[in-house]
Amino acid sequence: MITVTDLALLGRSLAVDTDHLLTRLQDGAALLIHLAPPADYPYESHKVEERIVCIQGKLNLETEAGTCHALLAGQMALVPPGLRHRFAADSDGVILTLFGGA
């Protein structure tokens, strides 16, 4: 199951000038990706957690099971290890993906 977090809303709920640990990454990677329609993204899965942060624009994240999660700028999706997923063809924006887990 994919979990979506509104990072702007979470950030505004914190006390001013305090840190909030989202996760610790070990042996991970951070990738910046430009998505543009129309595209035919294949389904994929990973051995580690994947966090997808929509920096600009929008993206639709589909699972092979048929669920779809829409993300706008400032939102983050957590994709658990092994879940087959892909970006929908109409995704249009810039995203940051973080691979790895605790």
Image (cartoon, rainbow, N blue to C red):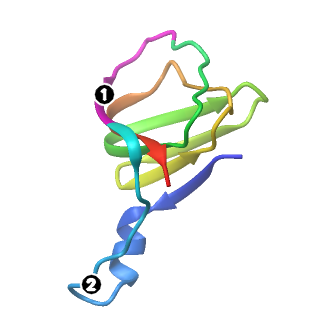
5 left or right, relative to 58 = right
How far apart are the alpha carbons under marks 2 and 1? 29 Å
- Tell me the amino acid under the disc marked 1: Ile
Q: Residue at x 51, y 60 (%)?
A: 5
- The residue depicted at 36 percent of the width and 75 percent of the height is 20
Q: Residue furthest bottom?
A: 15
Q: Is residue 65 visible?
A: yes
Amino acid type assigned to the residue bearing label 2 in the image: Thr
**Residue 49 lies in the magenta-colored region:** no
Which residues, given as a range, are shown in magenta? Answer: 30-40
Q: Quadrant of residue 45?
A: top right
**Are there few (<14), some (14-19), or many (20+) residues within 10 Å of tag 2?**
few
SS at badge 2? loop
Q: Mark number for residue 18?
A: 2
**Residue located at (61% from left, 17% from top):** 43
Determine whether 41 is above or below 82 in the image. above
Q: Secondary structure at mark 1?
A: strand
Q: Quadrant of residue 59?
A: top left
Q: Is residue 34 magenta?
A: yes
Outermost left residue: 17
Q: Give left or right: position of 10 versus 44.
A: left
Residue wearing tag 1: 33
Residue 18 falls left or right of residue 71: left
Q: Who is closer to the viewer here, 89 or 65?
A: 65
